[in-house]
């Protein structure tokens, strides 16, 4: 039967099934919705099986459709890999947008490992606090602080739970015996942080925090100030992993305080587009790397 099945019809089916829409499949493949619908009907006729349940506003895969999608997706992924291996000797360019502190503290130290594991991929990084606009094709993936709002056309992956707690230089830590000592010590504020000193003070039941001695609009600047003994920063174990591992920053009175926990960063990339496979390669690598780092950081 395979000889009678059109490869183009299978490609149309895979796109429609993956996107859950004949219209969106048509947009991805530069076809009309009518052409997509007719190709699916012809494929169902050739297979002798119904692949979609249809109503006026949506489509859903039947059991047969789910089975076919699994094998079709794997087949097209292998085909794409083979074509790329033999058709291009140029480096594949991955264009990343990233929250500034994550770029400086987390992404930059890890990129050499990604490039070593994925020869032939070139990475370009831009950092800002704005969300990437994928409609203009400037970026392939975005690492954002805070959950993306317009996510209908995006694959959004949380990058793990972060612990937020006070951290300071070893010299400053010698003068801090309990959480209440922070009432009389310079505090460093990260202006854009979702978890602030008032949240940590409330979690530890020690009243309201004093006004911060200094404020920064980037976490990596707040961390640098803490390293230089200018005060105590309230920061994420993920963003401060290098400083905590090296001993430049330490946790004062860690046994006698409660951490704030939240998911701070997310990876997002479009569900459609020619760079979707490259973005997924990076996403899979980053998630595995973040899981290993999170496990190590929580022991510090």
Image: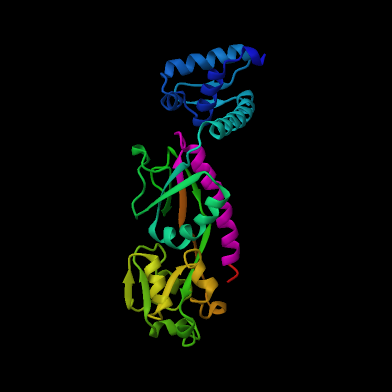
Instruction: Report the side of 181 relative to 47 (left or right).
Output: left
Residue 52 image point, x, y percent = 56, 22
Residue at 37% across, 38% down? 137
Q: Is residue 145 above or below residue 14?
A: below
Q: Main secondary structure of the magenta part?
A: helix
Quarter of the image where one finds residue 197: bottom left
Is residue 286 located in the magenta-colored stretch of the structure?
yes
From this viewpoint, is residue 48 visible? no
Residue at 37% across, 81% down? 186
Residue at 43% across, 38% down? 152
The image quadrant where one finds the C terminus is: bottom right
**Which residue of the protein is positioned furthest toward the bottom in this rendering?**
175
Residue 58 image point, x, y percent = 47, 26
From this viewpoint, is residue 163 visible? yes
Residue 299 image point, x, y percent = 60, 69
Instruction: Depth check: give the residue in front, 236 or 139.
Output: 139
Instruction: Depth check: give the residue in front, 246 or 56.
Output: 246
Residue 191 image point, x, y percent = 34, 66
Instruction: Report the side of 87 relative to 221 (left or right).
Output: right
Q: Is residue 95 above or below residue 25?
A: below
Quarter of the image where one finds residue 10: top right
The region drawn magenta spans 268-297
């Amino acid at each position: 039967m395979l000889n009678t099945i059109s490869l183009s019809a299978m490609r149309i089916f895979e796109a429609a099934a993956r996107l859950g829409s004949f219209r969106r499949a048509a947009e991805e493949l530069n076809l009309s919705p009518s052409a997509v619908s007719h190709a699916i009907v012809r494929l169902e006729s050739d297979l002798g099986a119904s692949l979609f349940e249809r109503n006026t506003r949506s489509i859903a895969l039947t059991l047969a459709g789910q089975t076919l999608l699994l094998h079709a997706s794997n087949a097209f992924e292998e085909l794409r890999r083979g074509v790329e291996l033999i058709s291009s000797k140029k480096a594949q360019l991955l264009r990343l947008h990233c929250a500034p502190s994550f770029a400086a503290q987390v992404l930059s130290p890890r990129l050499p490992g990604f490039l070593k594991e994925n020869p032939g991929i070139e990475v370009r990084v831009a950092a800002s606090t704005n969300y990437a606009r994928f409609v203009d094709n400037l970026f392939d993936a975005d690492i954002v602080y805070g959950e993306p709002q317009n996510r209908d056309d995006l694959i959004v992956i949380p990058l793990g739970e972060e612990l937020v707690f006070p951290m300071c230089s070893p010299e400053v830590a010698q003068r801090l015996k309990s959480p209440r000592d922070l009432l009389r010590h310079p505090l460093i504020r990260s202006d854009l942080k979702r978890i602030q000193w008032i949240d940590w003070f409330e979690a530890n039941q020690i009243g309201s925090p004093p006004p911060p001695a200094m404020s920064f609009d980037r976490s990596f600047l707040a961390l640098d100030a803490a390293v230089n003994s200018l005060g105590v920063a309230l920061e994420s174990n993920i963003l401060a992993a290098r400083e905590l591992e090296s001993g430049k920053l330490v946790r004062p009175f860690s046994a006698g305080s409660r951490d704030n926990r939240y998911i701070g960063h997310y990876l997002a990339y479009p569900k459609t587009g020619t760079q979707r496979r490259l973005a997924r390669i990076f996403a899979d690598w980053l998630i595995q790397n973040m899981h290993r780092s999170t496990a190590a950081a929580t022991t510090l």
